Image (tube, rainbow, N blue to C red):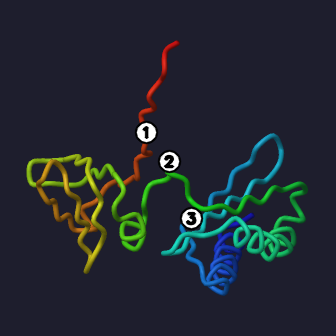
Amino acid sequence: MGAKETENIDARIAEVVTGFGARLVDIVRRRERGVDVVEVFVDHERGITVEELADLSRSLSPMVETALEARGAYRLNVSSPGLDRPLRFGWQYSRHAGRTAQIVFEAEAGERTVVGKLLGEENGVITVEEGGELFRIPFEKVRRGVVLPLFKETERKRG
């Protein structure tokens, strides 16, 4: 698929996603064992349900199939971005407010990392609380932001 076709299909995918009231986070293409794989990552400020993802996948499938028919087999995966995917948009920081996040950003003294409670994004500034200190980070200074999984310690009873 050439650059122009890729651009066209990306725009069409974005239209369908927007039509569902969701937001396009990313489109990833790769070849895996002779099969074209198209991964479409979508989300919503309130989160997105499995049913919504399935409906979106059914709507996108014919379009992707038509675009890739000359190349043969393909696989379409439509999902929400997992915790392992970096946050790419300001609204994602607000969506995950209250969760623990790791933010790597450009500071005066070089690159800096904070790990703390994500308070959200407002007017292009990400706010994180780490150890009682508030960090206000301009979005354009963020190099990478990820939500960290929360692991609850479980008490084991010994017999």
What amino acid does circle 2 point to? Asp
What amino acid does circle 3 point to? Asp
- The residue positioned 20% from the left and 57% from the top of the image is 129
Q: Position of residue 67 (x, y in %)?
A: 82, 71
- Residue at mark 2: 84
What amino acid does circle 1 point to? Lys
Q: Is residue 1 above or below residue 108?
A: below
Q: Residues within 10 Å of mark 2 (few under 14, many from 20)?
A: few
Please identify, in this view, whether the residue under mark 3 or under mark 2 is nearer the observer.
Answer: 2
At mark 1, the secondary structure is: loop
Say whether residue 63 is left or right of residue 82.
right
Task: Please report contact status of discs 3 and 1: CB closer than 8 Å, yes or no.
Answer: no
Residue 73 falls in which quadrant of the image? bottom right
- How far is disc 3 from disc 2 in space, using C-alphas? 13 Å
Q: Earlier in the sequence, mark 3 or mark 1?
A: 3
Q: Position of residue 10 (x, y in %)?
A: 65, 73
Task: Please report contact status of discs 3 and 2: CB closer than 8 Å, yes or no.
Answer: no
- The residue positioned 40% from the left and 52% from the top of the image is 146
- The residue positioned 14% from the left and 60% from the top of the image is 134
Residue 126 falls in which quadrant of the image? bottom left
Q: Earlier in the sequence, mark 3 or mark 2?
A: 3
At mark 2, the secondary structure is: loop
Q: Return the residue found at the far front.
A: 159
Residue 60 falls in which quadrant of the image? bottom right
Along the line of sight, which residue is nearer the eye, 11 or 124? 124
- Residue at mark 1: 152
- Residue at mark 3: 26
Q: Position of residue 25 (x, y in %)?
A: 54, 68
Q: Earlier in the sequence, mark 2 or mark 1?
A: 2
